Image: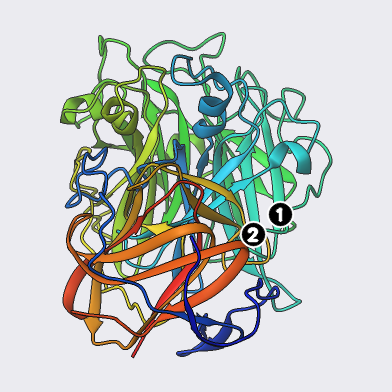
Amino acid sequence: MKPKIILCAAAIAALLSGCASQSLEGRPTITEGETSMIISDTEKRTEAILDFYKQPENGNPISAQIYCADPTAVEYGGRLYVYGTNDHQQYESVGEEGKNTYGDIRSIVVFSTEDMVNWTYHGAIDVGAIAPWIYASWAPTIISRVEEDGLTHFYLYFSNSGAGVGVITSTDPVTGWSDPLGKPLISSSTEGLGDCPNPFDPGAVIDDDGVGWIAFGAGKAADGSDYMTKAARIARLGSDLISIEEIAEIPDYYHFEASELNYINGTYVYTYNTSWDERYRWEEPTDPPAACSMAYMTTKTPLVSESWEYRGHYFLNPGESGESYSNNHTHLHKFNGKYYVIYHTLALQDAKDIHGGFRSLGIEEIDVDEDTLEISLIGASKEGTKQTEKLNPYYAHPGAEMSNCREIEFESSEGELNPVSPVSKSSGAWISLRGAKLSGGSRLYLRVKGSGRVELRLGSPDGKTAAAIDFDSAEPATFYTEDLKGFSGTKDIYLVFSDPGITLYAWQAEK
């Protein structure tokens, strides 16, 4: 398919690395540099795929394509970055008929969002290449701080299978990771560990004094019981955040795994996944936690074991909320003044009618009283969170930012706006973004590769076509059209692909 080039006589070629110049208060744009104007027939229609793995009105799972679990998160640059176990790596290894044994997972997935409904998939951190000594990389937890060089340093801890905890570091939330130790941070030989049978599933936090803490542990100690496993631990990290200074036991009840830590109003909040065991014994003033639910404990003196107070359970097993029953792992996070709980379910694999145990991430708003540290009890939902701000279409958005998609895969796009970009697998494939605030427009820009056509539609995959661009380019190139119609109001945006093999690096509207 050969487009008719109306403007810009230069040959179509890839823009160089750094093609997105800065404007709109530091936002990237693809409206400058080498571009080609295309006139396309907007009456021509691609038949879009109209069945959904994730209904358009729903926020969960946050990705309709990538399997991911065991979430953690950190805020940076006004975005919430979420990290998780890369179940998709196991899925790609064994296929739809295979089982998720977790054995092939040696990477960590990264997503980010500004508005809690549109998520950018940043690809995976290849922990196996960064730290080749590992067995696996599961259940990460992350903390960050600004250090003497003026940069924000990120510390990403992960489960080295069930054998311990590793750590990698970077000054970027997505790229540039390195292994500062060349060995585990925590293993069975760590001094002061005691009888902790599985020193994994870390949860880390930095308190108001700048002290780092890490909780971990699972299984059942030799002298433990179903009621009190004696397996959970908390450790004070050294000032370098990659060493252990002192370890103490957390005496939690019906403990299973999935440690995380928060620091709220001068208090340490430890969250964990309870076991499937029958609650044959209970001596606390609260109700006993539901099976495989998420519970929490609090203290102001984390190394004093007897100071930890059980406070209740706050997140039910997904099976109690209409999803399939599964293991459970959450992260509690305050972002832009609201608390959220990030978790995983089997919702995506169930929608695809596969049964290997491949998990996907969800997120809910949750009430946390910062004075009393009471946390409301909630469960999973399909609806998820509300959009916190409207999407601005007038700066460049990476193709990997979306609320939903169909028949999409991802490929590396080093040097472009995002490390990975979506590729259409079939005719009628699409990606969508929710809640775009449209206030007119004269041009639509696309940075793409491949042969075919991308149609921007409003409201649904088969909605009104606001613009269309035909192209044929073997390399990444930027095209635009001045025929942009109906671009007003708050609407969902769908980018529909006419053919397989089209890569979308970025898109942008211009007034």
Q: State which quadrant residue 153 falls in.
A: bottom right
Residue plotted at (26% across, 44% down): 49
Confirm whether residue 241 shows in the render: no
Q: Secondary structure at mark 1?
A: strand
Q: Where is residue 125? Give x, y as percent.
A: 64, 47
Q: Is residue 31 above or below residue 341?
A: below
Q: State which quadrant residue 39 falls in.
A: bottom left
372 relative to 158 in the view: left or right: left
Residue plotted at (20% across, 38% down): 379
Residue hosting label 2: 154
Q: State which quadrant residue 358 falls in.
A: top left
Q: Nearer the viewer, residue 418 or 281?
A: 418
Q: Do tag 1 and tag 2 residues touch (Cβ < 8 Å)?
A: yes
Q: Residues within 10 Å of mark 1 (few under 14, many from 20)?
A: many
Residue hosting label 1: 169
Q: Nearer the viewer, residue 104 or 503?
A: 503
Amino acid type at mark 2: Phe
Amino acid type at mark 1: Thr
**Which circle marks residue 347 in the picture?**
none
394 relative to 134 in the view: left or right: left
Q: Is residue 458 above or below residue 127?
A: below
Residue plotted at (65% across, 75% down): 15
State the quadrant of the C terminus.
Answer: bottom left
Distance CA(mark 1)–CA(mark 2): 6 Å
Q: Where is residue 385? Give x, y as percent.
A: 23, 55
Q: Where is residue 418? Give x, y as percent.
A: 57, 63
Q: Residues within 10 Å of mark 2 (few under 14, many from 20)?
A: many
Q: Secondary structure at mark 2?
A: strand
Confirm whether residue 125 shows in the render: yes
Q: Of label 1 and label 2, which has the lower sequence position?
A: 2
Q: Where is residue 399? Give x, y as percent.
A: 46, 61
